[in-house]
Image (cartoon, helix red, strand yellow):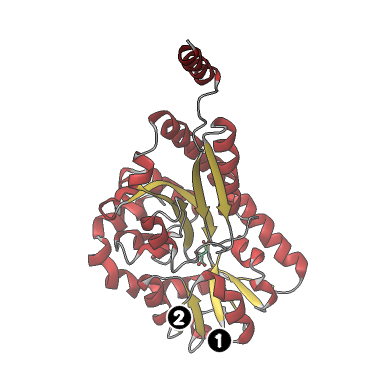
Amino acid sequence: MRQLLATISVITLALAAPAAQAEPIKIKFSHVVAEQTPKGQGALMFKKLAEERLPGKVVVEVYPNSSLFGDAKEMEALALGDVQLIAPSLSKFDKYTKKLQVFDLPFLFDDIDAVDRFQHSKAGRDLLDVIASKGYKGLAYWHNGMKQLSANKPLRVPKDAEGLKFRIQQSDVLLAQFKAMNANPQKMAFAEVYQALQTGTVDGQENTWSNIYSQKFHEVQKYISETNHGVIDYMLVTNTKFWEGLPKDIRATLDEVVKEVTAHTNKVANDYNERDKQRIIESGKSEILKLKKEELAQWRKAMEPVYKQFESQIGKDLIEAAKASNKQS
Ligand code: LMR
């Protein structure tokens, strides 16, 4: 009898106990820029929406400013499962594919709207799958903006850049772009740029207004030429096995969140860059040089050989598809 009562009470207790709470899925999102940038804000919005819509099921940790992984390590960390989301600049995939280097071709896109149209085209969307065979899943493109050129001397025409050392991202197209101007490009992680500019390891760099302002490059560069000669945009990337291994309902919600965050980020990226351009002007620390049409034409011409050099690697069709995105503007 005693035995029976004990068994009954164990069963009753087991039934009354709440179902064991499953641990929430942890998503680490690592990136290299400051929080007050399009990508920085996009990452925070992803965290907010994901946690709001999947309470207790998903926790997102955002690591900005290369605080978890810098440029050199983030792709590897994603492959190893040490991080689940990253959004490297499209210039940083050249170890994995040459196709994405289309985005680095100088003066290819007239503005960020043209970039957006290309990314929405079939050719652009297909590129999200270009590193699928390596276990990476491209979820979306996020905008930053157009690049400007900075140095401690005024750069009005390509000749002014001759012999100067420029920091570049990890991209052979960008290497060729600066070589075409007889300058000395140096590949360098984003986290090292401020110090390299400050100590004179390099003389100049190219970047968007939001990166220049948030990294304080304008405090160590006397001039910024408004060239809009290229683009810095991102691919939001995850590990295919991780993403596809998520419970179906969770993945569907996260896919929806990615869509919303992407739409918002891409809508406001331009405003961030305009805001930061104004802040640089107001700081009085760096002079912004507006270039004349003829001067811009000289940069365009000087960088032209890069197209021939990379045409076969990137693909003529892809370059043409990207060019076509300008026509509607
Ligand atoms: C850079 O390295 O200059 C940029 O790609 C940084 C970034 O992520 O915007």
| Circle 1 residue | 201
Out of 18 and 146, give the one closest to the viewer: 18
* Count of marks overlaid on the render: 2
| Circle 2 residue | 186
Out of 257 and 172, give the one closest to the viewer: 257
Look at 50% across and 38% down and name the residue there: 23
Please state if 97 lies on the left or on the right of 75 as rendered: left
Look at 50% across and 55% down and name the residue there: 111
Mark 1, Cα crowd under 10 Å, few <14 / some 14-19 / many 20+, is some
Percent x, y for residue 207? 54, 67
Secondary structure beneath disc 1? loop
As drawn, 174 above or below 256: below
Mark 2, Cα crowd under 10 Å, few <14 / some 14-19 / many 20+, is some
Percent x, y for residue 112? 50, 53
Look at 57% across and 43% down and name the residue there: 47
Out of 189 and 327, give the one closest to the viewer: 189
Give the residue type that dot 1 points to. Thr
Percent x, y for residue 264? 56, 41
Q: Which residue lies furthest to the left in this view?
A: 312
Where on the picture, by quarter, is residue 97? bottom left
As drawn, 99 above or below 138: below
Secondary structure beneath disc 2? strand
Q: Label 2 near label 1: C-beta < 8 Å?
A: yes
As drawn, 27 above or below 306: above
Please state if 178 lies on the left or on the right of 156 as rendered: left
Give the residue type that dot 2 points to. Gln
Determine if residue 327 is in view: no
Where on the picture, by quarter, is residue 153? bottom right
Q: How far apart are marks 1 and 2 (CA)?
A: 10 Å
Look at 42% across and 31% down and name the residue there: 252
Determine if residue 84 is in view: yes
